[in-house]
Image (cartoon, rainbow, N blue to C red):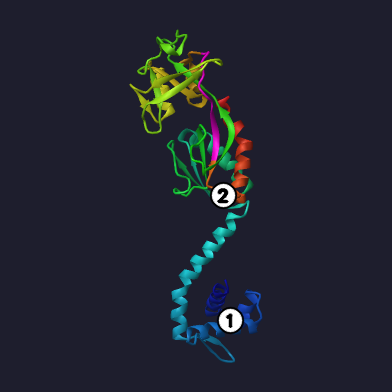
Amino acid sequence: MNDYKALKTFLLAAEKRNFAQVARELDMTPAAVTRAIAALEDDLGVQLFVRTTRQVSLTTDGAVFAAQIQPAVDALESARREVRNAHKVDEGRLRISAPTWFGKAVLPPILSGFRQLYPKMSFEISLSDGLINIVDDDYDLAIRISAQPSDKFTIWRKIRVVPRILVAAPGSCFVGMQHPSELTPDDCLAYSGESRSETWVLSDGGSSMTVSAGRAFSANSGEVLADMAADGAGVAMLPGFHISEHLRTGRLVHVLRGWAPPDLWLTLYYPPYQALPPRIASFSKFFEEQVASHMVTLD
C-alpha cells in the first residue's frame, strides 16, 4: 500500500498547500512528506508542486493529476473501510435473505434489538420463500425453514426444530379419516417453491407411507394453503406458524393425529467461509438467543 499512501499524501498536500500541516495530520515528519512527494514526481516525470520559502502551490500537471486520481483514491478508501468493517463485531452491513412470513412477523424486533446493541450496524433484507444461491446473490446469510440443504458447499446451522401437522376444515370429510391411505392426490394441497406437486412422507412411529400431493392444487405460500384448507379445498401439511390463528379460531383442525411428517428446521445458511466474519457471528448468536421468544407460535 506504499503507492496508496503516497497518493493520499499528495492529495492532502494539494488540499492544504502546507507540507508541515500534512506531516502533522498523517503523523509523518516534514522530511518524509517531502521525500514522498519527490518520489512521486520522479515516478511520474513531472513537477507536481512549486515550492517557495513561503508557500506550496500545485503546478498545472499537479492540478490535473489530483483531479484524476481523487475518485480512485476515494473508492479505494471506501473499499478498505468496508473490508475493515467486515472484521468488526459492531460495525458494517449485513445482507440477509429471509422467508416472507418470517421476515414480516419475527425478524423486525430481532433486528431492532441487535441495532440497539450495535447502532453502527446496517442491514439489507430481502424476503423470498424460494431457494437462493447465497454466493451468487451476494448474501451474508440466509434464514430458511426447510429440510437439510442439498448444497454440500453451503454452511448451515440448525437453530430449532419446526414441527408440521396435517390440517383441514372442521366440517370437511377429512376430519374423520383414520389412515393416510384414505387420501387421494386431489385431496392434498402441496407446498412447493415452484408451485408443483410434492410427495408427503408420513409416519405413525412404527410404519411410514408416502402420499402424492398437489395434483389439484399447489402453491409456494403457506398462507395460501392454510386459507384453501380452511375453505374446505383439502388437507394441508404446514408448520404451526402458518396455521396458529386458524387453529385458534377453529377454521382449521388437526387431522390424522397419529401420523406426522418429518420435522423441518429453522436454519441459518452462510457462504462457505473458513471462519464467520465477526459481525455475522455476532448477529447469528444474538438471533439464536432471541428467536425463541419471538417465535412462540412454532411451539
Name the residue at 45% across, 9% down: 177
Q: Which residues are magenta?
A: 257-268
Q: Is residue 148 above or below residue 59?
A: above
Q: Secondary structure at mark 1?
A: helix
- For the residue pair 232 and 110, the one nearer the viewer reads as 232
In the rendering, at what x and y percent does residue 196 appear?
Answer: 36, 29
Whether residue 119 appears in this view of the structure is no
Which residue is the site of mark 2?
A: 273
Report the side of 243 relative to 22 (left or right).
left
- For the residue pair 70 and 39, the one nearer the viewer reads as 39
User: What's under tag 1, amino acid-wise?
Assistant: Ala
In the rendering, at what x and y percent does residue 69 appear?
Answer: 46, 74
Q: Quadrant of the C terminus?
A: top right
User: What's under tag 2, amino acid-wise?
Assistant: Tyr
Which residue is the site of mark 1?
A: 36
Camera-near label (2 vs 1) is 2
Mark before the other along the chain sequence, 2 or 1:
1
- For the residue pair 57 and 155, the one nearer the viewer reads as 155
Q: Quadrant of the N terminus?
A: bottom right
Q: Is residue 41 above or below residue 89?
A: below
